[in-house]
Amino acid sequence: MRSRIRARALVAALVWLGAAACGSKDDDGGGAIVGSGTSDSGGSGVGGAGVGNGGAGGTAVPGAMGGAPPGPVVNVSGSTGTGGEKTCTGETTTAMRVPLDLYLMLDSSGSMLEATDDGVGSADKWTAVKDALRAFLSDDGSSGMGVGLQFFPQLKENVPESCSSDADCGDAAPCLLRLCWNIVDVAVPCVQDADCPDAEPGSCVAFGICEDDDQYVCSLGNECIARDERGNLVSLGDCLPPPPDITRCLGVTSCELPPYATPEVPIGELPAARGVLLEALDARMPQGNTPTRAALAGAVEHAVAFAEANPEHEVAVVLATDGFPTECVGEDVVTLEQAVLEVAEVAEAGLRAGVRTFAIGVFGPYDILVGAPVGLDWIADAGGTDRAFIVDTSRDVTMQFLDALNAIRGARLGCEFTIPDPPSGKMLDYGYVNVDFTSGGTTTRLLRVRDEDACDPASGGWYYDVDPAVGEPSRINVCPSSCRTFQAANDGSVQIELGCATQTVIE
């Protein structure tokens, strides 16, 4: 007869109620696909230069958009241009970054209470992540950013604390009354035999607790048999009906979008919003499972709506999780890979609507070993941020999580800048705008390209968000390779010059 499985672990997990049976087998976390990444997500390192001294290799022709490509950069420090002409001097202002707002969707499932082994004394993942967020929100470098917050899972309202039948749970049914008993060392809730892997007659059975040790569950109506430390079979008495604190409603997680699209803390500018954000973090207690798709879909919906209401801002979602979808997956989803791809599709839809998704994973070494870096990388890549950030719980969790947030803050979503107003009494001509980058006492000029598709992976450049020939631009976007250069420079600054003919790449 099958022996016992730890009962109290059942309450912490509920769906994947991993537990040791007949002795001490360490919980390995069970995650099959995990995301991976490094702190360079969002762009770090110089990559292609994109800026530099001199314009060797061709001539930058104001306004021209045809012919052979010129050198990527021209000297703008008042020196003679490549054709011998004197460089024009216009009105120059320091570029203003497009304000950045983050909607943080934070995993507060029960597994966030798992202990870390980071060597710095963090009690659990939840405490370490909160410490990182507290430092980030209090950092002067975050001032001016907008930050909003919501947690997942969100739970259905008016669900009873315990149940004795499915009817007790209402739309949160089923009640946890039966387990798949044909799986060694794992307790999987079920309603019928077909719910169990490799279902066989009698595999979904009513469970109870051992009479002489209520820390273990057993097959109801049978005797509890276990092995002691010497391997001898011992009896723990009869298998008794489970107490109310174990029989919970399994359908308590909300899969509706409104609870996730409605922030616990609305997006507000730091430092003014810091106090209410910290209060919400301190008031939250992890519980439940991981409805990642619903959580991200709600976050994207809110971020898109906020961006539409604040067109002068750039809005992004930060999905921070320690697990993978265990709730709210599509009807046709039967594998973890399919569940993750569903989430990636949500991130891709957000990107099409103008909202990027950053992903941060908090994983133990085993999770990284068996899954790295696939899952979260898929989500981050689909969301337009290339790779996920991975926090390894065997190292300093707080510092790694903070590093990820700082990298996201530093990325500023692709180096987008507002177009300055022209001097009083003058009209702005979009053919007379230039972008300069200053670092280490050297100022260099970027050349304008037609659009994002025309960005050279090495030489970079800049482009308008809207082609002036068809509409009115509101932003200057810097090509990815030039953006990486901006972010790698500790002393860099960007200037926008009005009044001199735009120097462009000749295509």
Image (spheres, rainbow, N blue to C red):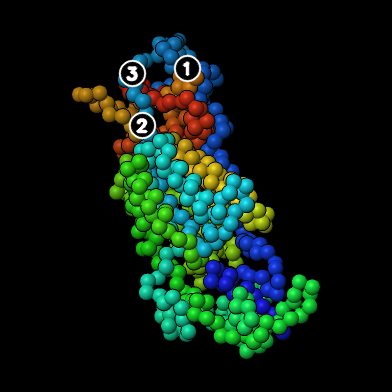
Q: SS class of the residue under badge 1?
A: loop
Q: Residue at x 45, y 22 (%)?
A: 438
* Residue at image mark 3: 90
Out of 185 and 210, give the one closest to the viewer.
210
Instruction: Tell me: 494 left or right of 3.
Output: left
* Residue at image mark 1: 441
Above or below residue 182? Residue 482 is above
Classify 10 Å Cα crowding around label 2: few (below 14), some (14-19), many (20 and above).
some
* Residue 426 picture location, percent across and down: 23, 24
Classify 10 Å Cα crowding around label 3: few (below 14), some (14-19), many (20 and above).
some
* Nearest to viewer (mark 3 / mark 1): 1
Q: Residue at x 58, y 49 (%)?
A: 121
* Residue at image mark 2: 96
Amino acid at pointer 2: Met
* Residue 223 picture location, percent across and down: 67, 86
* Residue 458 picture location, percent across and down: 56, 31
Q: SS class of the residue under badge 2?
A: strand
Earlier sequence position, callout 2 versus callout 1: 2
Amino acid at pointer 1: Gly
Amino acid at pointer 3: Gly
Q: Quadrant of residue 92?
A: top left
Above or below residue 412? Residue 221 is below
